[in-house]
């Protein structure tokens, strides 16, 4: 049952690397927001709206990846193919 171990490893990588990428992306975006707000304080409200919209999109991409990884971990579609091959 190497398939189960590989799926667990892949799910861990998807979740871990997705979280790492989302954290790096939000950190860079937050620092750029603070830089631009310090340079032009009159645009702070517009920039804040755009920053929160992008933060939601970055988090949404991570959560979709987590959902796909957990789907593969719980309802593995590869196991059905494996049992069909083993039955032949």
Image (tube, rainbow, N blue to C red):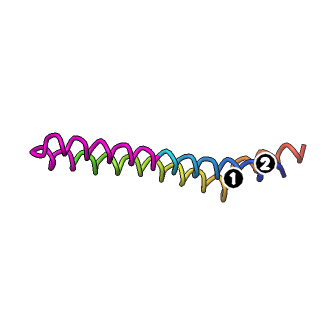
- Rendered residue at 36%/47% (across/down): 57
Mark 2 Cα-neighbour bin, 10 Å: few <14, some 14–19, many ≥20: few
Q: In the image, 47: left or right of 69? A: left
How much space separates mark 1 and mark 2, taking CA atoms? Answer: 9 Å
Q: Earlier in the sequence, mark 1 or mark 2?
A: 2
In x, y percent, where is residue 35? 25, 42
- Rendered residue at 51%/51% (across/down): 19
In x, y percent, where is residue 74? 66, 59
**Label 1 secondary element:** loop
Q: In the image, 39: left or right of 65? A: left
Q: Is residue 47 magenta?
A: yes
In x, y percent, where is residue 42? 9, 45
Q: Which residue is mark 2?
A: 3
Mark 1 Cα-neighbour bin, 10 Å: few <14, some 14–19, many ≥20: some
Q: Which one is nearer the viewer's eye here, 69 or 39?
A: 39
Q: Which one is nearer the viewer's eye here, 52 or 67?
A: 52
- Rendered residue at 45%/50% (across/down): 23
Q: In the image, 70: left or right of 64? A: right
> Which image quarter holds the C terminus?
top right
Q: Which residue is mark 1?
A: 76
**Label 2 secondary element:** helix
Q: Report the span colored magenta.
A: 22-48
Which circle marks residue 47 in the picture? none
The answer to the question of whether label 1 and label 2 lie on touching residues, with beta carbons closer than 8 A, is: yes
């Amino acid at each position: 049952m190497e398939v189960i171990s590989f799926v667990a490893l892949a799910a861990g990588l998807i979740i871990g690397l997705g979280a790492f990428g989302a954290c790096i992306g939000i950190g860079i975006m937050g620092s750029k927001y603070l830089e631009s707000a310090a340079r032009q304080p009159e645009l702070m409200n517009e920039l804040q709206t755009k920053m929160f919209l992008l933060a939601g999109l970055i988090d949404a991409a991570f959560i979709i990846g987590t959902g796909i990884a957990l789907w593969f971990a719980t309802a593995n579609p590869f196991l059905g193919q494996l049992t069909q091959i083993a039955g032949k």
